[in-house]
Amino acid sequence: MMAGKYDFADFSDIAIANGLYQNRHENHECSDIDILVPYLYGTGRLLYGNGETQGNEAVIIQEKPYLKFDGDGNHIDISSNLTVDAQDNIPHHIVRITGPGEYSLIKTNVLQRDIVRRFLLMKIFPSTALNSLRKAIASIKGIIDIYDENITKIQQLEYMSKGIMAVRISPAPNIFDIEIQATAIEDGTGRFPPADGEKTVFDDVHGLTHCIERDFTKEHDNYQVIDSFLVDTAYAERCGFSKYRLSEEGLLNLLEFVYEHKDKYFAEWPERTPMKFRGTISAEDIDIQVKSNVEWFSVEGIVRIGGMKHSLESLIRNCSNSTFQNYIKISDDEFVRISDKLKKHIALLETFPTEKKKKKVPKFQMGALANVLKKLHYHSDKAYTSFMEKTKSAFALHAEVPSMLNATLRPYQKEGFQWLCRLNAWGAGACLADDMGLGKTLQMLAFLLYKAAEGPSLVVAPKSVIQNWMSEAKRFTPTLHTILLNEEANRHQVIKDSKKDDVVLCTYGLLTTEGELLEKKEWNVICLDEAHQIKNRQTAASHTAMQLHAGYRVILTGTPLQNNLSELWNLFQFINPGLLNTWPVFRDSFIAVPPDEEHREMLKDLTQPFILRRTKHEVLQDLPEKTILTHMVEQTDKELEVYEEMRRLTEIKFKVKKTKAERNEAKELRMNFFTELMKLRQAACSMKLVYAGWKDQSSKIEELMNLLDGIVYNEENNVIIFSQFTSFLEMVKPEFKKRNWDFLYLDGQTPMDKRKEIVAKFQKGESRIFLSSLKAGGLGINLTAANYVILLDPWWNPAIENQAMDRAHRIGQKREVTVIRLITCQTIEEKILRLHERKQELSDEILDGTSDSWQLTYEDILDMVSPF
């Protein structure tokens, strides 16, 4: 540039001119803007545009050079608004176009360029050297702008992992997949194979990244513990290293394990709402309120679970609906553990009726409720306390046997009398269920005498034993005025005029026909003898009995349960209404469910206080032995051939009917089954009972006569012969007449007064042979003159047979009794004996809380006609 030619130019003009010249003639790679902007910054002389915008002043913004540090956990990224060229140099200044007429200018000095160049050439920085980086940053602050906010989130190695395990749970159809993974730090997001992988890791927790050293020893130990638990306790299927499959109950076991070891394990559900375990319910968590009413007590309460309050009713309901032994569901996907003992107590509360979210407990069940309450925390009103004191006083009562009783009670009979008096003082009904022959009638007469001054009493008994009541009442309680209602012409007046010291006797038949008269009277005591007569709640006798009014109710029966638990419910509905809840609730709780130990124990707890049962073996050491023999009868080839053809045709019929029955459980179909089975039972006795034209003698009758020849030969022997079929007994009579054997005969058609005469003759020894139908002579009469009992055919329920045997094996018997069952080989009779092995439990063991609810099924029926 020539001197003096451009005197108006300043330094910036000269610099721009030189720069432009060099850029064009020396092939520099910068643009004219890179030359113009640095020199025109702040002069207002840089213009831009064309047309209407021509001549507008450009905007130049100067930036400061900076370094930026970003941490991603494993390393630190370094960036800047400066760049390094191919020769690792940084220009003095950088110009960037940021918009129309807008420019950004970065100017640097030598020191700034050197600092930035050094950092940018490193590109990344290891996180493990974070402390060194921080020192370097501190030394350059003030020389260059620093953006290091992100690296403040990175913490230098300051955590040692605790080996905590994440239990990852994924639902699969009817099962759960489990994977155990290690975590580096609590609340961290990283997951690792237990005791495997990188030793030093980075993990983010609440926006902070931590550098952690994993403790492989703790991870290994914690994994081994949960692995053993899964396989040995939760019964998980191992599917590879740290992977398992579990059932739902096994999962609950696992969740409880995790809950109890929170310092080492936690559960996570990647795919669904988690199932949660909320801990174990103890008795201390339940608080109950008991309030009294006239005939019942209300029970309600709260349950504290995991800091929350739930109603007692919801806990009871959840216990009932639980499908697991020790876990109950308290809300959607929330479970708690409950002990077997506590669950049993809660389940007992479930048997009580519910009204407005409160349990209504009949006063008869206060003993059972008290057993529950003493295990829990409860508060009660004064009436409850008063009732419990009354109960204690009642059971401490020592009643004296009335002096007017014309008999000396045996010790166990005196205990039975006092037991009746104690329950009476409490206000609860009783079931006296002593073995046949232990004097239930005498114990009841003593009690009726004890209560006589309080008003008239009613005794209902079968026709077969009503005369026995009359005679024993006259003998043992002559001060009682005993009236046999069946023999009274004006029954209405007799009932109306009955008063204290009166005992009105009637049969079950008369109970049904004269029910309206009997229902109008307020009786002092009502006693049902052989109470299984009302075992079926749908019969007229049961319905009428339930309508009777009395201050106290007693039932006498040697077989409180013959077939199934519905019978027990009906008997207790008579003596203590509501004790076993309503029929639908009882059915659903004890009959519809498969029988198990818990339900048997529950039923025992409910019924045991009101049942007194003593066996002969327990109380009569002086009673002679009873020997039971099964004598098998071989049929002739002809009989066997005909029987087998009957069996085969019946089996075919049953299989067709069974298919119909599966579609329609009609009562008439079941009855049809038993009608067909009846024919097979008759054929096993004698073909003539089925085929009128049969000419041959019955093999069973021939075997009977062979046995009797030996028995009757000894003049000291007396024998009772029972059969289900009076028609079969009619076939036996002619054989006795052929031998000129005198015999006595009793069946359901024998008048009441004649029955008494027949029994008396046998007891006096006027005849050595007593023929009787099982129904007519199997209960309520004393035949201790006999030392042999022969059962010509088996009945479905062994309890009925036991009653027949006990006509001879009872108080007053001085000789050993031999019982002989005649069973025809390869017939339905053998199958019935097999049935006895299962059904025997029904009559006695329920009284100890160990009986199953069992009844004859179609499978049992079909088994009766299956081939051997």
Image (cartoon, rainbow, N blue to C red):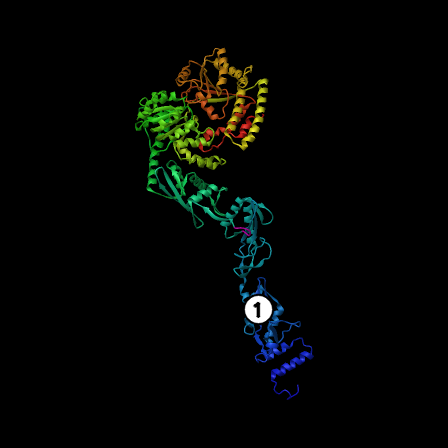
Quadrant assignment, res 369: top left
Q: Which residues are magenta?
A: 269-273
Find the residue positioned furthest to the bottom.
4
Position of 244 compared to 356: left or right? right
Quarter in which the N terminus is drawn:
bottom right
Quarter in which the C terminus is drawn:
top right
Quadrant assignment, res 94: bottom right
Q: Position of residue 86 (x, y in %)?
A: 66, 71
Q: Position of residue 696 (x, y in %)?
A: 56, 15
Q: Is residue 386 above or below residue 27?
A: above
Q: Can residue 593 be found in the magenta stretch?
A: no
- Mark 1 residue type: Lys
Q: Can residue 272 be found in the magenta stretch?
A: yes
Element on which disc 1 rests: strand
Query: Local crowd at mark 1 within 10 Å, few (<14), some, or many (≥20)?
Result: some
Position of 86 compared to 369: left or right? right
Which of the pair 9/235 is nearer the observer? 9
Q: Is residue 683 above or below residue 583?
A: above
Q: How many marks?
A: 1
Q: Position of residue 208 (x, y in %)?
A: 53, 61
Asked whether residue 862 is in view, the answer is yes
Q: Residue tagged by mark 1?
A: 68
Q: Position of residue 781 (x, y in %)?
A: 41, 21
- Please name the predominant secondary structure of the magenta segment in the image: loop
